[in-house]
Image (tube, helix red, strand yellow):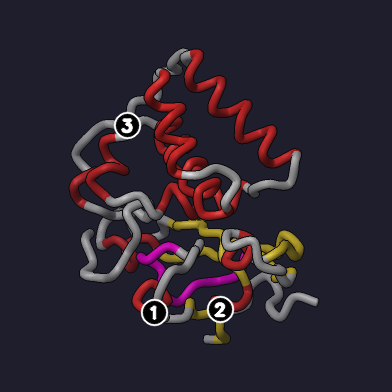
Amino acid sequence: MDKNVPRGPHDLGGASKFMCEPVDTEPHALTDFDKEVDALRGVLGAKGVMTVDELRRGIEAIPEADYNRLSYYRRWIRSIADNLLAKGVISEAELRAALDRV
Amino acid sequence: MPAFAPGAHVRVRDDWPETRGRVHIRTPHYVRGMRGTVVRCFGAFPNPEDLAFARPATRRPLYHVAFDQPAVWQEGKAGDELLVEIYEHWLEPA
């Protein structure tokens, strides 16, 4: 039941575009990438750099088209990168250089 | 001390902070302005609306609130119930 309200892209309850698609409840294997992102988030939390609430805020700030296209852990790494850039932990140049090496 | 006891009738604030800037709201859009019944209080937890911005966070009581599902989503049978976790500052007596 769509309501014409300013909901965030994560606030999906009742959104009709998701109502006719069965939910995939099969377990799926984690990739090495998934595990690395999860571990990175764990380290950043343990070191007091960012909280899970900041992670979620960053995930929910992803523009809707990207949010729906990205996998679960790709949303995480996008949020982690945005948070670390905003906090000045890493710079745009450092991130770009690291991505160029991949 | 939680303001609402189990069984208390409450209304979720019909408020849209999303329209006023960057926010981190845990109260689903589909229950704003709806009447429900408090089922239980889980205790008090730091407010995620502040934690998400690395601000000092006041502890707020968190409740399970039951809503009549047909009234929320215009589907389901009479008696179907929707349980949502909602922080106290989003609730008012109804």
Subunit that carries the residue with mark 1: B
Left or right, B89 with reference to A31: right
Q: Secondary structure at mark 3?
A: loop
Circle 1 is placed at which residue position?
Answer: B20
Work out how far the residue at label 3 is from the one at label 1, CA to CA, in angstroms. Answer: 33 Å
Is residue B18 magenta-colored?
no
Q: Amino acid at mark 3?
A: Val
Residue closer to the observer: A77 or A68: A77
Subunit that carries the residue with mark 3: A
* Snapshot quadrant of residue A21: top left
* Snapshot quadrant of residue B69: bottom left
* Snapshot quadrant of residue A37: top right
Q: Is residue B11 above or below residue A32?
A: below
Work out how far the residue at label 2 is from the one at label 1, CA to CA, in angstroms. Answer: 20 Å
Q: Secondary structure at mark 2?
A: strand
Q: Which of the two marks, 2 or 1, is nearer to us in this view?
A: 1
Circle 3 is placed at which residue position?
Answer: A23
Q: Which of the two marks, 3 or 1, is nearer to us in this view?
A: 1
Q: Amino acid at mark 2?
A: Leu
Work out how far the residue at label 3 is from the one at label 2, CA to CA, in angstroms. Answer: 31 Å
Circle 2 is placed at which residue position?
Answer: B91
How many marks the image carries: the answer is 3
Subunit that carries the residue with mark 2: B
Residue at left offset 57%, top offset 66%: B49
Mark with earlier residue (2, 1): 1
Residue B41 is situated, as x and y percent measured from the top left of the image, at: 70, 64
- Is residue A59 in sight in this rendering? yes
Disc 3 and disc 2 in contact, CB within 8 angstroms: no
Q: Amino acid at mark 1?
A: Arg
Q: Secondary structure at mark 1?
A: helix
